[in-house]
Amino acid sequence: MNWLTDFIRPRIRSLVPQKEVPDNLWTKCPSCEGMLFHRDLDEALNVCYHCGHHMRITVKKRLGMLFDNGTYETLELPKVPFDPLKFKDRKKYADRLRDAQAKTNLKEAITLAKGTICGQKTVIAAFNFSFMGGSMGAGVGEAIVRAAEEAVASGSALVVIPSSGGARMQEGMLSLVQMPRSIIAVEMVKEARLPYIVLLTDPTTGGVSASFAMVGDIHLAEPGAMIGFAGRRVIEETVREVLPENFQTAEYLLEHGIVDQVVPRAELPETIGRILGLLMDKSACCSDTGKTKKTRKTGTAQA
Amino acid sequence: MSQLDFEKPILELEGKIAELRHVSGGSEVNIADEISRMQAKAARLLEQAYGKLTPAQKVQIARHQERPHFKDYIEKLIDDFTPLAGDRAFAEDYALPGGLGRFKGYPCVIIGHEKGHDTESRIKHNFGMARPEGYRKAQRLLSMASHFQLPVITLVDTAGAYPGRGAEERGQSEAIAKSIESCLRADVPIISIIVGEGGSGGAIAIAVADRVYMLEHSIYSVISPEGCASILWRSATHAEEAATALKLTAQDLKALDLIDGIIDEPVGGAHRHKDQTIANVGKTIEAALAELTPWDTNSLKQARRSKFLAYGRNFQA
């Protein structure tokens, strides 16, 4: 925030041998390399308080900050075939899957939850990037269908928050057909005239970006998030030109008309809540009825 | 003509036969017996080779330049073909041509990837890799088909959607997603045939259909075997293993119940028997249309959805 934290503190830190600092107390911002104290970083919702860089955030924290008072109910994930192709590369997919489950303590790369945002009933399907890169196979696709069914059954809005490298290739064609399957899910929500909001977070690429993520009523994106179809390296190899620095960032997509708004993380609950209110609550009310902000708490600080 | 490795002995034999024929013209020695013996042997070799193709070999055949292309199918199967160009916003995409025409006399809409047949046309058609404009034109044609109640035939043959700067800037992802959405919303029967390469999102964008068929030696995959190998094996040299692991052949996908049927190719593949292959495709489309045309709009759309929603649900968990 000032020259002391910006400049002097990192400088001093660089003089002190690393081992004296327990590694979980401080995080280095990957963008400005400023040092971030874990409690402050947590308070700032994993956004660098030196430069505003948005780091990834756990799903638990994400749900806690979005839902009113940080309270929500998680939905059980639907059962799907485990390793349908018996896929094996250098390692068995079954093992990779079990490892990911053990590492993250999650069943799949997606979490479903329901609650309210600024008083509006909402179902959220949020991707866990740490689970096999948030890749979409049958488990994730089926979960999106489940989320849509729940939204329709309970008259809730659907908010999907992708953070994914794309399709899970270890499930072969079964992962590719999740593109139409997830769009069918969105169709159900749209037919019920319920809002479908996509919150694009870092990264949203490949088969995930080319399906449910691009058919939202509203597309919001977090600052700096990487969003695109093909990977930057593939494009550079194909077209043999140097791409702009901010190519495929949320801001670049905003300029090119693909997202509605780029919204800093801290403003998301209020923005999503306001949009949901505008789309779902037809009764006349003025914006400062206090229905929103003040009743909110920034979730639980776990995980 | 490009050669397939595993076809080399056969091609050599065929070369020798041609040579002998040429020689026998001026010679008094009767070598007809020898020729027919060699022909029989060539046929036997071909049958052997095509009887036990590996997935990696199928990938090669599916990409064979001499396989019939969109243009060939149109010439043989569609009368009164009337190409329709452009997405009405930015450009025409020659990688994904489409238009109106008559199939067996009945008007329909046809959309498909075109890879091109020589260097010049391959460049023009961008090797069958479509840009957002192509998928937006597909959306336009799909909604026109609904409006005029014309069935839709799509022919899939692409390595994938084009990974380019402009394509990204103009919303490649959005164009593909909306193309899938347009397929789901269509009020008319859609029949898709994977005729060569079914490459990932760029393929499924026009293949969300009431009936999805694959030619016997075509492939359909979430990622190319080379791409998969370079990510999971960290080296493209493992493409053969990846081709097997991905289960991308028509036979694998039928066994997994992810396609509706396989269309036979004569022994030796579509690249040797264009006309017969195209005729087989025509028969399949005809049968599918006869079956689907009587359906009312709502049940058709509902069945299309249910079919895709059922994918994976019946597997042994």
Image (spheres, grey):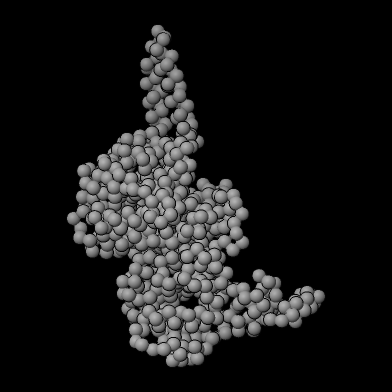
Quadrant showing the C terminus of chain B: bottom left
**Residue B48, relative to residue A246: is it above or below?**
above
How many numbered discs?
0
Relative depth, front residue between B272 and B81: B81
Q: Residue at x 37, y 39 (%)?
A: B68
Instruction: Say whether residue B146 is left or right of residue A230.
Output: left
Which residue is pictured at 29% across the width and 47% down the height? Answer: B100
Of all residues shown, which one is farthest toward the left?
A: B294
Q: Residue B207 placed where, x, y %?
A: 36, 54
Q: B243 and A236: which one is in front?
A: A236
Is residue A197 something one can see in this rendering? yes
- Any part of residue A20 in sight: no
Q: Quadrant of residue A13?
A: bottom right
**Which residue, as the protein is rendered here, is positioned at the far top?**
B28
Residue A294 to residue B44: above or below: below
Task: Locate residue B251, reporting x and y percent.
Answer: 38, 48
Q: Residue at x 43, y 65 (%)?
A: A214
The image quadrant of residue A303 is: bottom right
Outermost residue to the front: B89
Image location (x, y in percent) of residue B87: 38, 54
The answer to which quarter of the image holds residue A235 is bottom right
Vertical order, A259 against B139 (above or below): below
In this orientation, which residue lies closer to the viewer: B206 or A73? Answer: B206
- At 62% across and 76% down in the image, what residue appears? A52
- In the depicted view, which residue is nearer to us: B39 or A61? A61
Where's residue A123, x and y in %? 41, 78
